[in-house]
Image: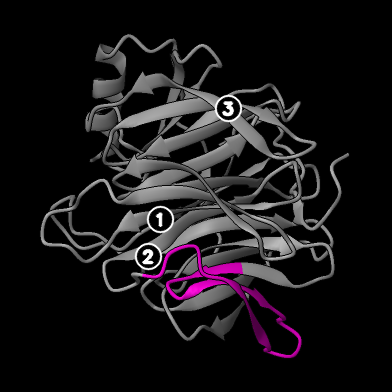
Amino acid sequence: MPLDDAAAAIASAGVTRMRNLAIRDVVTVPLGLAESPVWDDDAGALWLVEITERRVLRVAPESGAITRFDMPAEIGSLGLTADGRLVVALRTGVHLFDPASGRLDFLVAPETDVTASRLNDGRVGPDGNFWVGSMDARRPVRDRSGALYRVTPQGACTRVADGFYVSNGLAWSPDGRRMYHADSRGIYVQVFDFDPRDGAATNPRRLLTLTEQDGLPDGAAVDAEGFYWSAGITADVLNRIAPDGSIVERIPLPISAPTMPCFGGADLRTLFVTSLASDRSGSFQHGRLIALDVGVAGLPTQRFGQAPG
């Protein structure tokens, strides 16, 4: 959607605030289905995945230099670990990947029917576990076969919730007591009560429903003030959502099909956003990685296997 059209749609929706911000491209090379940006404060780098290209990327945010790591299967998401490796969600299951050696160690397969589904959005929670959802990926008509899983560093896997078209949008409140989760095709964001000590997620309830004009909810992040930033993939916007479910701000983006935001940089005040290659706007656009300052800091990145604070 062109920026002028996005701005008009936002204004007519009665949203409290909208802004056009200075935005820069972090990398100059075209990307494919870019997703799951994660800020690595130790390395001062950004990690992300290209799902269908089966790659992990490490990006130096100042120079835009990219290091690529090929995976043996489609990769939906990744997280950092406490020992310098990555936890990666491949179609074949959750693995631990060592970028230094290239070694990939299998941990667990949350789902066995990988011909019809794949792992999608995943993130390390404040409990030190890897939370990852699945989606229907191969059926002619997508159904509610997606689920949400909690994976421990020891490889124990628990199915926490199910009945989703596309599990997405994982993020936690600053105090770790609330977990956000979305179903991109179910068109809603929900919240769970969360216990960061043992990873118990209970009392799921709908927070809000989003239309294609609002921007269906894809990946997400939470800022230090407790607001949930959702990539509105069908409207080319970022929606900033209050804990009560109201959209307080929309930021139109000059990219087609944004997939996920991530706070990073030395002060966690840079918002990185990935997008996927798409012709939905009427002309083909490659996937991109952009950066903008939205005037608020994000939360520190959690690490797989790191004991809760």
Give the residue at x 70% y 57%.
152
Q: Is residue 141 above or below residue 225?
A: below
Pair 3/1: label in front: 3
Q: Residue at x 60, y 33 (%)?
A: 201
Report which residue position mark 1 lands on. Answer: 134
- The relative height of residue 256 versus residue 117 in the rendered view (above or below) is above
Kind of residue at disc 1:
Ser
Pick whichever, 86 or 264, lies toward us. Answer: 86
C-beta proximity under 8 Å, tags 3 and 1: no
Marks 2 and 1, how far apart at CA: 6 Å
Dot 3: within a 10 Å radius of its alpha carbon, few (fewer than 14), some, or many (20 or more) residues? Answer: some
Number of marks: 3
Q: What kind of element bears circle 1? A: strand
Give the amino acid at mark 3.
Thr
In the image, taking residue 98 as reference, residue 149 lies left or right, namely left
Query: How far separated are the C-alphas under marks 3 and 2?
Result: 25 Å
Q: Earlier in the sequence, mark 2 or mark 1?
A: 2
- Expressed as whole percent of the image width and height from the top left, the position of residue 100 reads 76, 86
- Image quarter for residue 85? bottom right
**Residue 118 got which mark?**
2
Please state the horizontal and vertical placement of residue 211, each as a whole percent of the image: 24, 27
The residue to which callout 3 is attached is 202
Region of the chain picked out in magenta, as a range: 88-112
Instruction: From the viewer's perspective, tell me whether residue 205 is left or right of residue 192.
Output: left
Task: Give SS at disc 2.
Answer: strand
**The disc label shown at residue 48, or none:** none
Please state if 181 lies on the left or on the right of 125 as rendered. Answer: left
